[in-house]
Amino acid sequence: MRSGRAVVWLMLMVGGSVSVRADLLWDNGPFDGQHAISSELDHFLVTHGSFAADDAMFSEGGIVDGIGWMGASLIDQNHPFSSYQAQAVVLAADPDFTVVYASEPAPFDVVSTGGLYYGYRIYAGELSLPDLPLAPGTYFFGVRLTSLSGRNFQLSAGNGIVAGDSMGLFQGQDFWGGPPAPDWVTIQQFAGFTSDYSFQVYGRVPEPAAAALLGLVLLSARRR
């Protein structure tokens, strides 16, 4: 499949004045103060790692270029924010939660809120993604932090009210009730409560003429 940057280049070459809008494409809202779910690969305490993911619904095709989220991490003199990297996954909303995109661990932007959740430092993170063209539909987005020995948790949102089509998902065979990759369970199946996760999806939405061209490019890519 062509990269998102190539899609934009094609739009500009064919459409000339066709434009794309910078947007917050999806927002599950801020931390509701209720729950924190492991989403980490610390290479010491969590052998196989864990992942939290939640869904976003897109009525238009677009290009995703970033994920934001609220988390809580072990931050002290031995575990500064700079000791972590972030790793993202994007899943299709099918029965197998097919992986659409998965990144390698990479640096991310982080702002500490100054708050604590059971001793862990609450922060807002944002990870840039290579331009990812997505057709209209529902997708699941997840981010976890990787480190040598630092804990990280994804924070909940919505006060038990589910946004989109589904509550949050969990994957992590090191935890009771958590399945190994590539299997996922809902947070209700894993932890016994209903919850969404606090996250945002950023990207660009084509204007109508560009959206039609994006659909043709995606169709052509799938046929190869």
Image (spheres, rainbow, N blue to C red):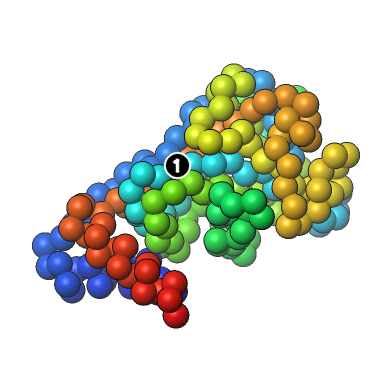
Which residue is located at x 67 percent, y 26 percent?
194
Does 174 appear above or below 112?
below
Residue labelled with disc 1: 57
Quadrant in the picture for the N terminus: bottom left
Q: Position of residue 172 (x, y in %)?
A: 79, 48
Which residue is located at x 62 percent, y 25 percent?
115
Quadrant in the picture for the C terminus: bottom left
Q: Residues within 10 Å of mark 1 (few under 14, many from 20)?
A: some
Which residue is located at x 25 percent, y 72 percent?
10
Q: Is residue 81 visible?
A: no
Q: Position of residue 215 (x, y in %)?
A: 31, 62
Q: Position of residue 64 (x, y in %)?
A: 41, 54
72 on left or right of 42: left
169 on left or right of 222: right
Does 177 appear above or below 192?
below
Q: Nearer the viewer, residue 153 or 203?
A: 203
Q: Is residue 57 visible?
A: yes
Quadrant position of residue 152: top right
Does 76 appear above or below 5?
above
Does 167 appear above or below 204?
above
53 on left or right of 130: right
Tag 1: residue type?
Answer: Met
Which element carries disc 1, helix, strand or loop? strand
Q: Nearer the viewer, residue 165 or 47?
A: 165
Quadrant position of residue 25: top left
